[in-house]
Image: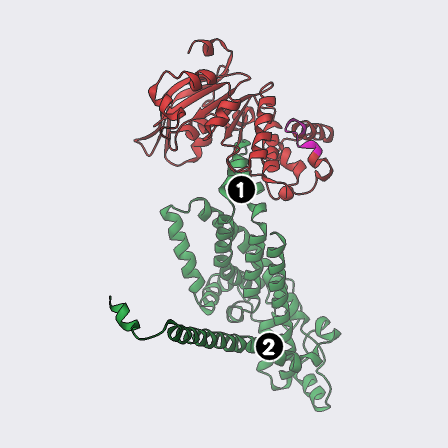
Chain colours: A red, B green
Amino acid sequence: MNDINTQPSILTIENLSIAYDKDKLAVKNVSATIKKNAITAIMGPSGCGKTTLLRAMNRMHELYPNISTTGQIRLYDENIYDMSTIKLRRKIGMVFQRPNPFPTLSIYDNVIAGYKLNGIKLKRSERDEIVETSLKNVTLWDEVKNSLHKKGNFLSGGQQQRLCIARALAFKPDVILLDEPTSALDPIATAKIEDLLIDLKENYSIVLVTHNMSQAARISDNAMYMYMGELIEYDETTKIFTNPKETSTQNYITGRFG
Amino acid sequence: MNQTNILAGKKVTELIPDLFSGRKLKDRLFLIGIVIFSLLTISMVVLIIGSMILKGYHQINWAFFTQSPPDTFQAMMAKMSGKTIPGGIINGITGSLYLVGIASLIAIPFGVLIGIYLYENSKKKYAGFIRDITDVLQGVPSIVIGLIVYLWVVVEITHGYSVLAGSVALAIMMLPLIIRSTEESLKMIPDTLKEAAIALGTPYYKVVMRVLIPSSFSGLMTGILLAISRILGETAPLMLTTLGNPAINWNIAKPVSAVPLLIWQFYNDPNMVDLIWSSSLFLMGFVLLLNILSKWIAARQK
């Protein structure tokens, strides 16, 4: 890990351990820094703790019962476990495996749902601006600009997922967390989302959990490999895929297991 | 090995048609059975509605919806001269709406909140306890609920039969229905929706108020409307709590009439028998309308 340390970082994970039901450690003593304006991929076999690690970055993991967390994660210099979840989740947005737009809200209201649900008042012009730029950012504007006030259930899966990314972008976050965002989508929709993520990293830092190694190879700058809750290796993606230091990583990359 | 012995000496074509006609016969018999029983069920409904309409329609007129019932002498005079009975059941209609309105005001907030609690804490022991109690409450005979409310409200609070007492009795009957339907319709919402709202930093009570409840609105409404249509026809608890009133009443501490109470009173007066049918027709039509409305709401949201 030489070059990776020289890049400016945005999130610092320090000795993070997360346990379910007292003894079952899902994440074991992980330390790493997430780099600014980069796509960081988290890879590993099922149950390796990658989703828990991702969710810990905006404290969504606290929804699970009987969870205990030690160590810390800092956003710039602020420990996220000392921040209010409202403030934290405005700065670190999240996109889920399956597109989950709010079925009772229009496309327009879905984009500004974060403001609406938190009761943050906006002027009409501000609202319009946020909706337009967010939808343009996810290249959905041209497809929906004439039906902004309709409910979004006629959108395709890929469009819905882009709407969900727009919803996360509307808060102008620093970091966007994506939990296997394309696993429910077809290859064309997947390609669109991947292109989108590469565009978005200019202004945002992105952390991506993926099952799909070729996706990680295609779009990520840095990659983590996790196994049994431990962070085995974290380096630039090209190094991970061409010259991994650990044999466990090598085995996973070459498809010998996982 | 044995199989070859059984089949020995028989051609395949001899075996197949036998088996085939046997199955077809069973299938047909079963179908005929189902059709007969379902026709029997349907004919009950058709007969009930039909006889209500036939016996009740000629009493349904403007006065029926705008006037209070006649006294027994007026009814007797009309009957002897072969006219329709004058007057109507406006005191019962307003009374029923008043009672159901107050009962809903009491039962809906409680029921929905308890339903949300059960959904959120479904695995806790206390939630299981509440669920069992709810089932018990649903099984309590309505006359018993009437008696208890008589003791608690009629004797202790309003010192006499009253709208409040009747509403409390009806609210107790509505509660289990609303609690269960709230819990069930919340369970239908995918967890991903909840996560989406939480990931936007939404405080939990706002997730409930602004995401969960709107998303399950049709289920909630259906449950509430069914609960209302269930209590609209309740008579026994009302006899012990609001008694009845020959005139329209809006005072919550005074007795009021209700359509099922009127039906019972008409039944006890040989001169008023004709009004039973029209009142029943009205009551049933209203309940039917609520049922159709709830089905429509449920279908529209899909």
Q: Residue type at mark 2: give it.
A: Val
**In the displayed structure, does residue B3 sit left or right of residue B230?**
left
Residue A219 on the magenta span: no
Pointer 1 chain: B
Task: Identify the residue at image location x=49%, y=54%.
Answer: B179
How far across and down, in percent of the image, does residue A207 sit?
50, 24
How far across and down, in percent of the image, does residue A173 sit?
58, 23
**In the displayed structure, does residue B143 sit left or right of residue A157?**
left
Q: Quadrant of residue A68?
A: top left
Pointer 2 chain: B
Q: Is residue A221 above or below residue B4?
A: above
Disc 2 marks which residue? B46
Work out how far the residue at label 2 is from the one at label 1, CA to CA, in angstroms: 43 Å
Q: Nearer the viewer, residue B111 or B257?
A: B111
Residue A168: tell me if it is visible. Answer: yes
Q: For the residue labelled by badge 2, is the local secondary structure a helix, a strand or a loop?
A: helix
User: Which residue reaches farthest bottom?
Assistant: B80
**In the displayed structure, does residue B80 sit left or right of residue A198?**
right
Q: Are marks 2 and 1 in contact (CB under 8 Å)?
A: no
Q: Earlier in the sequence, mark 2 or mark 1?
A: 2
Q: Nearer the viewer, residue A148 or A65?
A: A148
Q: Nearer the viewer, residue B161 or B11?
A: B11
Single out the mark in the foreground, 2 or 1: 2
| Residue at mark 2 shares a chain with residue at mark 1 | yes
Q: Quadrant of residue B251?
A: bottom right
How far across and down, in percent of the image, does residue A210 sit?
47, 29
Q: Residue type at mark 1: give it.
A: Val
Q: For the residue labelled by badge 1, is the local secondary structure a helix, a strand or a loop?
A: helix
User: Which residue reaches farthest right?
Assistant: B62
Disc 1 marks which residue? B208
How far across and down, in percent of the image, does residue A221 sit?
51, 18
Extent of the magenta region: A136-142
